[in-house]
Image: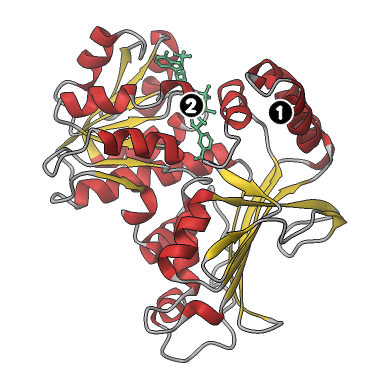
Amino acid sequence: MSGATIAVLGGYGAVGAVAVDRLTGAATELRVGGRDLDAAGALCARLGGPAAAHRVDLTDEVSLAAFCAGADVVLNCAGPSYRVLDSVARAARAAGARYVDVAGDEPLLRRVRATDSPDAPAAVVSAGVLPGLTGVLPALLLADDEDPAAVRLELHVGGAARITPVSAVDVLLATGPEFGTSLAAWRDGAITRGALSPRWHTRVPGFSGVVHALPYLTTEVADVAAARGIGEVRQFSVYVSERVPTVLATAWAEDPEDPTGWAGVLAEAADADVAERGRHYALTLRRFDGDEPTAEVSVHTRDPYELSGVVAALTVRALLDQESLHGAHPARDVLDPIATWHALTADPLCDTGGAPLVAGRGAHDPAADALR
Ligand SMILES: NC(=O)c1ccc[n+]([C@@H]2O[C@H](COP(=O)([O-])OP(=O)(O)OC[C@H]3O[C@@H](n4cnc5c(N)ncnc54)[C@H](OP(=O)(O)O)[C@@H]3O)[C@@H](O)[C@H]2O)c1
């Protein structure tokens, strides 16, 4: 693995800078790319080692091809993802490089799969927090040798966090059934619309103070539920105020064709949340075998962008270890859940609370044993 050439597009952005930092030990050549050579150079000077600055504009095919040439893996941390789509993935594969995208979701996976072939270099999408970790962590609370049909999982994700201008565009464009379904739960093998209600002014385990928990079942989590045969999954987006959900609802109602003009207002709403409550973001997942929770895992961080950079770097490292992998995959198919959990526990940007609560499970639960 230490001989790899890794090219990180958007390598000095909010996500990319952390990914680059976490990859310095995995590469002999680490390309940090973007349109601002000075910004890339400043990061490389700080990191030293194999990091080198490259000027590249992903909308310019020639500079993108040059950036990808000779790379073993291209990691895309540039966005907005719903505008970039598969342009970087295609350039990486044309150069014979494997590909990881910190974002992507179903639209990107579908596009990459459309041009897939059995010997195409592996392309891995959704390698961040959401999507990303949200698709990986459920496996920690499920044993391989059990029937999960009687299990209910509850996932809460959110907090008070900045929204960068690039990500604000993605948040605003990530609407519709390809991304998820509001007020829905996964129940008995299907997305059940209208199954859940918003919980305004509530308290949620793992989140401090009063928050709002709004049901939103992502396609990623629904896919995991379907693949694992989980009986019920309830997923909630957690907000510390009504600001961000109000801006989103207004943008989607007033400008359904192109809500991206609201990106600045959305970023301001997020900044106001941070000013009021401080930066904190959490992902908590609880398992219920009846009315009471029987197991729980949680990841806390100050910044979901930095955490996404950690996850993206873990995905690149996992891909470098899986030489024989080809074709297009979501990150949850590449990241080993237990190894990911240990890596997050060891990372200073994450707090997993040490050993997760594992109660009321069989003594032979391999996932629980490995986490203790
Ligand atoms: N899965 C998750 O949980 C998750 C979480 C957070 C973010 N994301 C995704 O991660 C991506 C990056 O978000 P971010 O918040 O880190 O954005 P950011 O801080 O604005 O960073 C974007 C980076 O991409 C570069 N870039 C932008 N346009 C470019 C172009 N045309 N050619 C080359 N480089 C370009 C930027 O540099 P220049 O502008 O100087 O070129 C910058 O280095 C977005 O797609 C976002 O949706 C995913």
User: Which is more toward the observer, 71 or 220?
Assistant: 220
User: Whole-Å distance between the Cαs marked 1 and 2?
Assistant: 16 Å
Q: Quadrant of residue 371?
A: bottom left
Q: Secondary structure at mark 2?
A: helix
Horizontal placement of 217 versus 365: left or right? right
Residue at screen point 42% across, 22% down: 84
Circle 1 residue: 252
Horizontal placement of 166 versus 310: left or right? right
Residue at screen point 51% across, 78% down: 149
Residue at screen point 74% across, 60% down: 196
Circle 2 residue: 82
What is the x, y in percent for residue 158? Answer: 67, 48
Query: Under 8 Å from ligand 1: the CB of mark 2?
Result: yes
Q: State whether residue 8 appears in this view.
A: yes
Label tally: 2
Horizontal placement of 186 versus 197: left or right? left
Outermost right residue: 201
What is the x, y in percent for residue 12? Answer: 44, 23
What is the x, y in percent for residue 37? Answer: 38, 9
Counting residues from the N terminus, which is met first, the one under dot 1 or under dot 2?
A: 2
User: Which is more toward the observer, 102 or 173?
Assistant: 173
Q: Secondary structure at mark 1?
A: helix
Vertical arrangement, residue 267 with respect to residue 361, above or below: above
